[in-house]
Amino acid sequence: MSLVFVSPGHAMGVGGNRLALYAPLMTAASPAGTAQSLAATVSGNAGWWDSSIPSALLGPANTANTVWNSPVTALIDLSGNGGNLQPFYSVTDSNLPQGAPHLSGLLGGAGYPVATTGLLQPALDPNAGWQLPGSTPSAAASWTWFLVWSRPNWRQGTSVDANPITLLTIGSRAILQVDSQGGANRLVLFPGASQVIVNATMARRHTHSIIIRYSPTSGADLWLDSVRVAQSVPWAPGTISGPVILLHDGTLQGAAQCWLHEAALWNRTLSDQDVASVTAYARRWVRGARKGLYFIVNGQSNAINYSMNDGAASLLVRGVAWHVGALAYNILATTGSATSFTMQSGNGIYAVAGANYPGSFLQDPGDGSSPTGWSLGADGLAVQQALAGLPAEDVSDICAIIWPWNETDSLRQYSEGPTFQAAALRFLSLLRAMLGDTTNKIPLVWWNAIPYGSADGITMHRQAVQSIASNTTANVVIGNRQTSDSNPRGSSWSLATGIAMGGDASHRDSADNQRFAMLAAPVVARTLLAGDYGDSISALPAALPHAGGPSIGHVYRQSSTTLIITVVPDAGNDLKVPLQAATGIGFAVMVGGTPGNDGTIVPAISCQRLDATHLQIVLASALQNASSACQLFYPLGPVQIGRGNAVTDNFSAMTLPAGWNAGTDLGTGWILDCPLAATFSGIPLSDSPT
């Protein structure tokens, strides 16, 4: 149902913590089909709770939530009977549940996320479930329960991880259980001496719906998704007491650690026609076996900061999970061990000859041989060992390799480009082989070089990345095509001017690493969807970024001091020239020469927006050479543009399809404009306007 609002963000109440509803909810938001009113589908609900949208979740102020990831005190009873579904804790716990988006297509759910370290993500509270206060269950009464849930991981973080999870408890008696890790993947009705195994193919990660219809005379019938899997099963619990509990068995650490999507109760046995109506209604949910995302991060100190200190890798994989509708998301990013790690500070892919910079992810034998035959070095063997330490089922989830990595490799000579490119591809192939990937299915996500290294070395690195990414068989995507719009780590930055002072110039600031992750998320998601790594969402709207920002398509030399740049849009439809971008920072023309043998560098002193796809650049001095001998760079080598100083699009102001606003679902930090892409090579000037 849709809610009646009395003012923006404020739903109309009808008393008893109930909200006013109207009309069936229409559902372009759900790829699984049209969401309807369950109360209208089958009448006579004694209770109905639907956490697919945040407004059905009650917040601490006793009002409906307006956004996801907000604290929840109860699930609102949409039947109008005032029986809100309350949190149940098996121990004293201050952890309030939250609503989470995109758990089953574009539909959400409610659960108890916790920040416990060392657990697979999302980690859910082992002590928390849901209860129906005041319920008085009885084996002598008829009833029907409908439940939709998702399990993101095996039970974890408890002393009873091998125990099954309980989906429904009535009066302290477990009604329905699913095996956890070490079990036989069974769905068991009425666990105990007279239990009935109704399914033996329950996946580690899944979303399912069940209907249990019970009467004292005919026993229980059970439907899993749309199929009846049990009929007339007797139930003789004896004396029962206590409330009905969902996703918890009522004992210490007895939580199912699942998301609750929807539940409903009828104090009668539904007819077969009613059951058929409910099973048809349940198709709004994407049900069946589900997937998890696992990313492996390689690199050196900036990668360590990105993944372990700034939480950017976790932001990236969480954002990608939102885009593809995945239930679980994890990263492998380790350092510090002598023999098992994925990142090593200061080390390139292979050693930088003559510069005393190490690197042995790939071992250069120093004999001039082609990198195509090089073997793993000590660093590469450590990566292999780190992967060997993962359970096989987690290794099978690895679906992306992330390289926020270029610093030592950007100190190489420009002439080393072909060797570096071949070495990068060789290490990538050996890494994929560790994962059993012989067809390049697992994509590599690389970034355009950060502003660290020599001008020639960074240009070499950027060109190598561009060349590798342009070969579709390599399956390499550039997750961030602009990284020079960032600040030294720990610098003092002015929001008003965009000027940063001090800091560690060799490392990117925390805020920038996090922003890089959020900008890369839709780019990585599109790549995973193309490789069949999606989960409950199969395609992204065209309105979301494809490349991560606009790019330079053409440079017209209007005069010896003025250039007109044509910008190719991505997801925005206009351009912004903020802060220091108006001074032309980052734009420069190389007159004569080539990378590795630089000519004269003429910087820009002004940049102005002409229209939605054109910029005017004014240079510091007049160009003397023919246009064919002049190349535009943005930026050249290690020039730092700085945070907030890049030309951007206006993506943050775009109207997005319903259910696809990351700023609403994941937090306001995800409301971003996308920067103008850095140039990989110089773009020759043209004497033609088009």
Image (tube, rainbow, N blue to C red):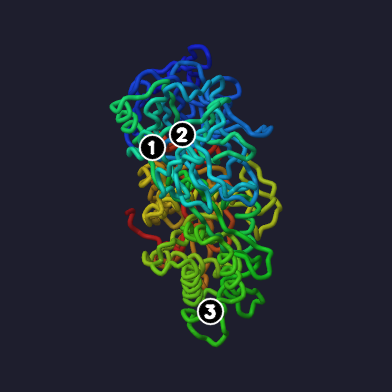
Alpha carbon distance from label 3 to label 1: 48 Å
In this image, 4 relative to 297: left or right? left
Q: Earlier in the sequence, mark 2 or mark 3?
A: 2
Q: Residue at x 60, y 75 (%)?
A: 360
Identify the element where label 3 is drawn: strand
Which residue lies most toward the right here?
502
Residue position for label 1:
285
Q: Earlier in the sequence, mark 1 or mark 2?
A: 2
Alpha carbon distance from label 1 to label 2: 9 Å
- Please determine whether, in this image, residue 412 is positioned above or below residue 91: below
Badge 3 density bin: few <14, some 14–19, many ≥20, Cα 10 Å = some
Give the percent coordinates (x, y) of residue 511. 61, 47
Q: Residue at x 50, y 45 (%)?
A: 152
- Quadrant the N terminus occupies: top left
- 1 and 2 marks in contact (CB < 8 Å): yes
Which label number is shown at residue 261? Answer: 2
Residue position for label 3:
375
> Which one is nearer the viewer's eye here, 568 or 445?
445
- Please determine whether, in this image, residue 300 is positioned above or below residue 83: below
> Which one is nearer the viewer's eye here, 44 or 151?
44
Give the percent coordinates (x, y) of residue 21. 41, 18
